[in-house]
Image (cartoon, helix red, strand yellow):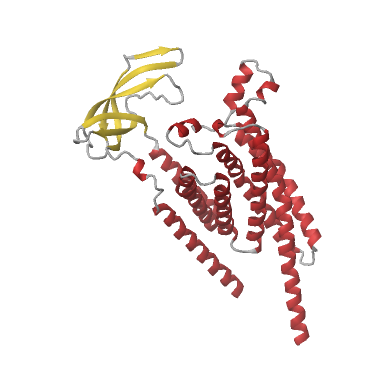
């Protein structure tokens, strides 16, 4: 009973610490706030009228200028109407076309004397829907997971803030992408695993196993990225970043970091599955040896790793399915396809991430066998000492 109370108290303290860290991450500045144009304001507006007469259509491509009449829904100009222009550049991935009744995100810029210069509808307003989705996700997680779901939601928020407030700003400031990302991933592994499992032998085994798996993926990514002659420019908006005044960044190292960051979530899942299963086995069979516990962990890992590697393949392939479709539609041979740098980069990311998944099972099994059977030996020693005293 006392042990249960102690565990609950330790769990409450841990949750409190991570709540405080999450709030702290939310409050600290990124250091890039001064890059935002202070001579502009952002607000939400409703599209009242549209004029497509100056738009030229070439097949699926639209170029020209769409006239729109906007009614401001918030900000200092709430309720006022403005005429604006939506420039179409003929780029399907960036152009947007407004319709009457749409809600737009509008940027209003001002001159040095405070005179309004432009009213620019830059995108459809999606923040409200995104918050609704996040709220539904949080409610579902809490209803299904209860206390564990609440801790999972906390780890989700902590991870998102750590990426935005720590990882991204430090990368922009020129920190070494590999060491920085490895440290961030280690911190996130600890936060997520210990929030869910507590600072227990299960949590420690899962943390050490997952970190060793991520470290293996990191080392393989460093080696094979050079062998594949892959550079960081294959990532979306990489060139845009360079041309924005950040030519000093090592995009190849950032790509390497992205490889093991992308697989770290699946690695943590597998490590937690193996560690929790081994803990259950040792609890049900206290006389199990370290070798038997290790083999049990391996068997659990084998059962899970097959589906987890396929999960990585599906997750990655979904991101470049149109690329594969384009190559097939043009009759490009498969040998050519897999030699193109964009495809090779995804192949490397998938297989190296899968390496980490395969290795995390034996790593976690080895750590778990040591920790769990050591607990059994310690308990037996205490029992023998008590018998001798009697």
Residue 193 appears in view: yes
Percent position of residue 102, x then y: 34, 29
Quarter of image, res 345? top right
Furthest residue in direction front, as rendered: 248
Percent position of residue 140, x then y: 50, 48
Quarter of image, res 129? top left
Quarter of image, res 100? top left
What is the total number of numbered labels drawn onto the structure image? 0
Q: Quadrant of the N terminus?
A: bottom right
Residue in the image at 27% along x and 38% along y: 39
**Horizontal placement of 327 versus 376: left or right?**
left
Residue in the image at 22% along x and 40% along y: 76
Q: Compare residues 59 and 46 and report the one nearer the observer.
A: 59
Residue in the image at 56% along x and 47% along y: 181
Residue 1 appears in view: no
Percent position of residue 65, x then y: 33, 19
Q: Quadrant of the C terminus?
A: bottom right
Q: Compare residues 352 and 4 and report the one nearer the observer.
A: 352
Furthest residue in direction bottom, as rendered: 390
Q: Compare residues 21 and 148 and report the one nearer the observer.
A: 21
Q: Is residue 110 above or below residue 271?
A: above
Percent position of residue 301, x then y: 73, 49
Q: Compare residues 262 and 290 and report the one nearer the observer.
A: 262
**Horizontal placement of 37 versus 328: left or right?**
left
């Amino acid at each position: 009973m006392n042990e249960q109370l102690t565990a609950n108290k330790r769990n409450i303290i841990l949750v409190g610490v991570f709540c405080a860290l999450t709030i702290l991450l939310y409050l600290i500045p990124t250091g890039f706030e001064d890059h935002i144009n202070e001579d502009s304001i952002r607000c939400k507006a409703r599209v009242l009228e549209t004029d497509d007469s100056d738009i030229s259509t070439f097949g699926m491509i639209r170029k020209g200028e769409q006239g729109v009449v906007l009614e401001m829904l918030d900000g200092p100009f709430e309720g006022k109407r403005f005429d604006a222009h939506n420039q179409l550049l003929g780029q399907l991935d960036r152009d947007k076309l407004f319709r009457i009744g749409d809600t737009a995100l509008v940027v209003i810029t001002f001159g040095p004397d405070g005179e309004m210069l432009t009213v620019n509808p830059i995108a459809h307003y999606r923040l409200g829907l995104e918050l609704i989705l996040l709220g539904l996700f949080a409610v579902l997680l809490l209803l299904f997971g209860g206390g564990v779901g609440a801790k999972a939601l906390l780890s989700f928020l902590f991870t998102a803030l750590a990426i935005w407030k720590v990882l991204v700003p430090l990368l922009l400031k020129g920190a070494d992408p590999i060491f920085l990302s490895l440290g961030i991933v280690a911190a996130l592994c600890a936060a997520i695993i210990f929030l869910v499992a507590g600072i227990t032998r299960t949590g420690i085994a899962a943390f050490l196993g997952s970190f060793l798996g991520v470290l293996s993926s990191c080392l393989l990514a460093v080696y094979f990225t050079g062998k594949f002659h892959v550079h960081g420019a294959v990532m979306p908006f990489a060139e845009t970043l360079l041309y924005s005044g950040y030519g000093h960044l090592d995009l190849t190292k950032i790509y390497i970091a992205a490889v093991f960051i992308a697989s770290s979530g699946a690695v943590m899942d597998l490590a937690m599955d193996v560690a929790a299963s081994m803990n259950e086995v040792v609890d049900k069979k206290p006389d199990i040896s370290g070798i038997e516990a290790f083999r049990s962990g391996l068997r659990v890992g084998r059962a899970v790793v097959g589906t987890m590697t396929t999960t990585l393949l599906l997750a990655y392939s979904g991101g470049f399915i149109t690329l594969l479709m384009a190559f097939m539609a043009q009759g490009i041979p498969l040998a050519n396809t897999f030699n193109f740098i964009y495809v090779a980069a995804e192949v490397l990311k998938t297989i190296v991430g899968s390496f980490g998944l395969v290795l995390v099972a034996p790593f976690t099994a080895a750590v778990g066998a040591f920790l769990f059977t050591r607990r059994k030996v310690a308990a037996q020693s205490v029992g023998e000492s008590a018998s001798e005293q009697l």
